[in-house]
Image (spheres, helix red, strand yellow):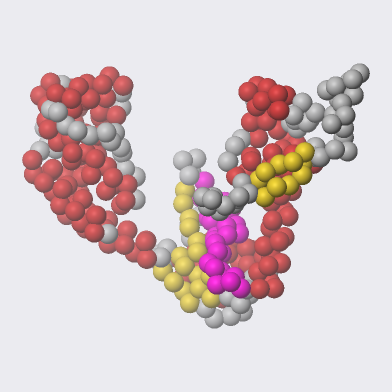
């Protein structure tokens, strides 16, 4: 190979490098694809935006000292964009992908099923997410979030208007099913959807929500015991000193448990299951903690500390949760 004696490290811009791309299926024994690589600033920028989106990184990531040092080492020619430029690029990707999906749904999908989910954030803002489910020409099931927006309330009118706006924006009129929470207010929302789409479809009630209502109703019979365990867990988790003391009790009782105490969200039965399932393993540690910390009983009250009956009730509930 001929090398310039005057500039031995000069790079020929017209010359491409060989790059062995690994196989996408990660199958052992299969050889990857050999391709050529040339410096392309636009391709690098697109890959950077893709990394930000796929790995759910903040836009500020590109301004981090470590990332900039890394880029200077591997590709000093690349001009790193600012966080504002990255945010605009991500939005352009969203617009492009949205347009592709919209065209695909119009051309290829005979029917689209929708699921909705509504909740209230810690800032007391109501949100709704609409997901489209469809089968492609190869009979593969896909699901895509087509709307994520704030709503004024959880009333049927507000939900219905949000669904109406979404259907009109996406031009969806071939709706097969709409699955919503098992709430009477959603009946109004569905009626609005029928008017917009000018079609008849199945109104599905979310099975997970129905199961949640069944479990929450069953919790009423043991609600006092669950409340005692919840308060005990909350008390211990409220300060590092209490957690440290509780861990000492766990070690003294020789309890082999690596899981940390966790608080539940009272409206999510699966989180209540996790809380009870972990807490009941440390029953003896709770008893020892109670005997050593007077403030534990004083703060929770005489009837606030879980006893043998409460732990027994919680064990029954975790067994029932496990079936679900």
- Side of 213 relative to 286 (left or right): right
Residue 93 on image: x %, y %: 71, 49
The residue under the point 31% across, 21% down is: 240
In the rendered image, the quadrant that contains the C terminus is: bottom left
Q: Front-most of 271 and 62? A: 62
Residue 281 magenta-highlighted: no
The residue under the point 32% across, 51% down is: 270
Q: Is residue 104 above or below residue 87?
A: below
Q: Is residue 302 above or below residue 116?
A: above
Q: Residue furthest left?
A: 308
Residue 280 on image: x %, y %: 18, 40
Determine the image quadrant of residue 228. top left
Q: Front-most of 13 and 229? A: 13
Query: Is most of the magenta stretch helix, strand or loop?
Result: strand
The residue under the point 37% across, 61% down is: 209
Residue 161 visible (yes or no): no
- Side of 140 relative to 11 (left or right): left
Residue 119 visible (yes or no): yes
Q: For the image shown, how many numbered marks are present on the structure?
A: 0
Q: Residue furthest front?
A: 1
Q: Residue furthest bottom?
A: 200
Q: Front-most of 260 and 220? A: 260
Residue 38 on image: x %, y %: 80, 40
Q: Front-most of 143 and 227? A: 143
The span shown in magenta is: 125-152
Residue 271 on image: x %, y %: 32, 47
Residue 150 magenta-highlighted: yes
The residue under the point 11% across, 46% down is: 312
Determine the image quadrant of residue 235. top left
- Side of 1 relative to 44 (left or right): right
Determine the image quadrant of residue 198. bottom right
In the rendered image, the quadrant that contains the N terminus is: top right
């Amino acid at each position: 190979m001929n090398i310039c004696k005057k500039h031995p490290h000069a790079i020929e811009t017209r010359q491409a490098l060989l790059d062995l791309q690994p196989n996408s299926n990660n199958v052992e024994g299969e050889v990857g694809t050999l391709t050529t690589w040339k410096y392309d600033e636009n391709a690098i920028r697109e890959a950077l935006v893709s990394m930000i989106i796929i790995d759910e990184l903040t836009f500020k990531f590109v301004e981090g000292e470590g990332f900039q040092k890394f880029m200077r080492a591997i590709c000093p020619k690349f001009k790193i964009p600012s966080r504002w430029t990255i945010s605009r690029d991500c939005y352009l990707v969203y617009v492009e992908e949205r347009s592709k999906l919209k065209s695909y749904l119009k051309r290829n999908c005979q029917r689209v099923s929708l699921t909705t989910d509504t909740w209230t954030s810690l800032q007391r803002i109501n949100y709704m997410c609409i997901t489209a489910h469809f089968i492609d020409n190869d009979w593969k099931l896909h699901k895509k979030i087509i709307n994520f927006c704030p709503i004024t309330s959880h009333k049927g009118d507000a939900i219905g208007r949000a669904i109406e706006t979404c259907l009109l924006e996406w031009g969806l009129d071939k709706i097969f099913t709409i699955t919503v929470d098992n709430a009477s207010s959603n009946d109004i929302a569905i009626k609005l959807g029928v008017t917009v789409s000018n079609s008849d479809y199945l109104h599905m009630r979310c099975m997970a929500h129905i199961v949640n209502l069944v479990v929450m109703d069953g919790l009423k019979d043991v609600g006092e015991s669950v409340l005692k365990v919840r308060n005990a867990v909350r008390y211990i988790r409220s300060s590092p000193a209490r957690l440290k003391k509780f861990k000492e009790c766990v070690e003294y009782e020789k309890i082999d448990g690596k899981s940390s105490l966790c608080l539940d969200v009272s409206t999510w039965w699966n989180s209540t299951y996790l809380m009870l399932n972990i807490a009941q393993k440390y029953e003896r540690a709770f008893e020892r903690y109670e005997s050593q910390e007077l403030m534990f009983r004083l703060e929770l009250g005489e009837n606030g500390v879980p006893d043998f009956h409460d732990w027994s009730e919680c064990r029954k509930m975790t067994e029932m949760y496990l079936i679900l």
